[in-house]
Image (cartoon, rainbow, N blue to C red):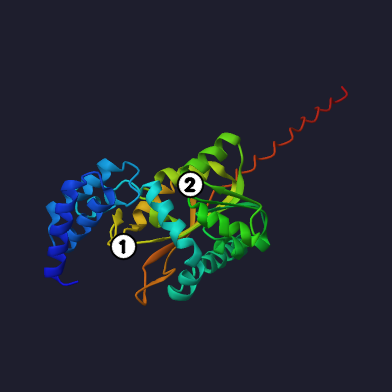
Amino acid sequence: MNRVELEASAASLALALEAAPDFANGWFSLGEMRRQLGQSEAAIAAYRKVTELDPSDIFGAGLRLARLGATTPDGMPEAYVRGMFDQYAPRFDSELVETLGYRAPALLRTAIEAAGKTQGRAFAFDAMIDLGCGTGLGGAAFRDGVKHLTGVDLSTGMIALAQQKKIYDRLEADDIARFLAGEIAAGRTCSLIVAADVFAYLGDLTGVCSAAARVMADGALFAFTLETHPDNGVLLGEGLRYAHGAAHVRAALAGLEILELTEVSTRNEAGVPVPGLLVVAQRSRPKPKPKPKLKTMPKPRSRKAG
């Protein structure tokens, strides 16, 4: 559609919305057209109308407002993320692996094995949590080294496909933060937490990293991949995915020991590797208390006969 056609379509849709002002989908489409035409103020007005009509924001209008500088991004709407991945689920594995060259699980497995060798630990974990497990690509990479494997994902469509693979011992369809809060409340702990590329859908990582630390047993590992950028903060990119600067990641992991923070690329975009980070952090083992020294009784002095 050229510019003239796009302007005509936008004008027609604006007229139609006068007669149907509560049509959220129509306002979102109008916002997209106005944005493509470079009409930022008109696009912002349309997106704001969407968020008024649909507070759950299934269309992600709030993210578009953030990209246009009208709001400060503070996370992604659950309805938007769930709807996106429910639709994506049937073609997720083939498109991610074959089209985008997805390699996060393999990179994480290699990094965790290397961390174990450095510490003289075998690749064996009592319990692992796979945050944002999707269809189970991450779980499959770790299953052989884990006694009990739990997966959590916001998308029920993804969870349904993961169940079919029979990889996990437990699967939960839930928000990551809510799930971790439940684990903390139940007093459950694990020896490994993995999050493969899921943080592209979270803004500030401080909360989730803090919650993860509280679920980790002493000596447990927390390994994840994410998209990054050269600056220090959190950036909402053009593709509506969050990129995190290394300084933000380090600050979010306060209290954990960072074993590795390496630049990697876990997937391609239009044939070009997407800049990312791979992180392995550990909850320190408590230092053993020193054994008390045995007190020796002084030898009695001998008396000289006199």
Q: Quadrant of residue 294?
A: top right
Task: Decide: few, some or many residues near mark 2? Use Cα within 10 Å; few <14, some 14-19, many ≥20.
Answer: many
Sequence-wise first label, 2 or 1: 2
Amino acid carrying mark 1 in the image? Gly
Left or right: residue 84 versus residue 148 is left
Quadrant into which the N terminus falls: bottom left
**Disc assigned to residue 239:** 1
Quadrant into which the C terminus falls: top right
Amino acid carrying mark 2 in the image? Ile
The residue that appears at 39% across and 65% down in the rendered structure is 276
The residue that appears at 14% across and 55% down in the rendered structure is 40
Q: Is residue 205 visible?
A: no
Q: Is residue 241 above or below residue 187?
A: below
Front residue of 13 and 239: 13
Q: Position of residue 278 (x, y in %)?
A: 45, 62
Front residue of 100 and 24: 24
Left or right: residue 234 versus residue 217 is left
